[in-house]
Amino acid sequence: MAHQNKSILRYGAVALALFGAASAVGQTQRKPPYWASIQKSEARMRSGPSTEFPVSWVYKRQNLPVKVVAVHSVWRKVQDPDGAQGWLHVRLLSPERTAIVIGKENGALRDLPQANAHISWRVQPGVVGVIDECEKGYCRFETNGRYGYIETARIWGDEAL
């Protein structure tokens, strides 16, 4: 029985390693620029594509959108919503599309992607959410189980690349 459990654990570890490698390969094949988001609760941005380079910024905002502007092996040069650029390891990134609410006023989440549609929720600048269905000046934006359509001018992370 113990031998069987070790074999299961070994095969499970191999499967996880292969899945991680396949994920990294999938992101390697994408040609920049493209959108991604920070997958981890803490991510260190470096001044160059290696752990030998100093940390220039530490992100503590999971799901923050970033624009990948260059690729070097398992490193991605990214730009954050404030315009800062640096290098993140691919394992710190997710292909999930997110956006951050920008501006000084609250953003309106509407029932439909139309300027005169009912406002279901309001979101403060700095709120991060998952986006999809971006077209005609609106994106479907979801945060904390609440969703609606927000004007693309009110978010960073949606423009076509």
Image (cartoon, rainbow, N blue to C red):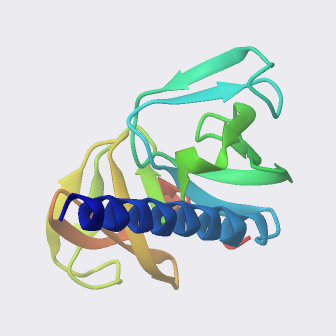
Q: Is residue 134 left or right of residue 25?
A: left
Task: Identify the image quadrant of the C terminus.
Answer: bottom right
For the point 27% across and 80% down, the residue is: 116
Residue at image point 47% right, 56% down = 155
Q: Which quadrant of the structure image shows residue 151? A: bottom left
Residue 131 position by quadrant: bottom left
Residue 108, compared with residue 105, is above or below; it is: below
Between 22 and 37, which is closer to the camera in this rendering?
22
Tell me where residue 76 appears, x and y as whole percent: 74, 47
Residue 154 visible somewhere in the drawing: no
* Residue at the spot 67% in from the left edge and 38% down from the top edge: 88
Residue 87 drawn at (x, y percent): 74, 36
Which residue occupies the extreme top position in the image? Answer: 54
- Foreground residue among 50 and 45: 50
The answer to whether residue 53 is above or below residue 157 is above
In the image, taking residue 89 as reference, residue 71 lies left or right, namely right
Q: Position of residue 46 (x, y in %)?
A: 72, 25
* Residue 28 visible at all: yes
Q: Residue at x 39, y 65 (%)?
A: 12
Q: Position of residue 47 (x, y in %)?
A: 79, 23
Question: Where's the N terminus, which quadrant?
Answer: bottom left
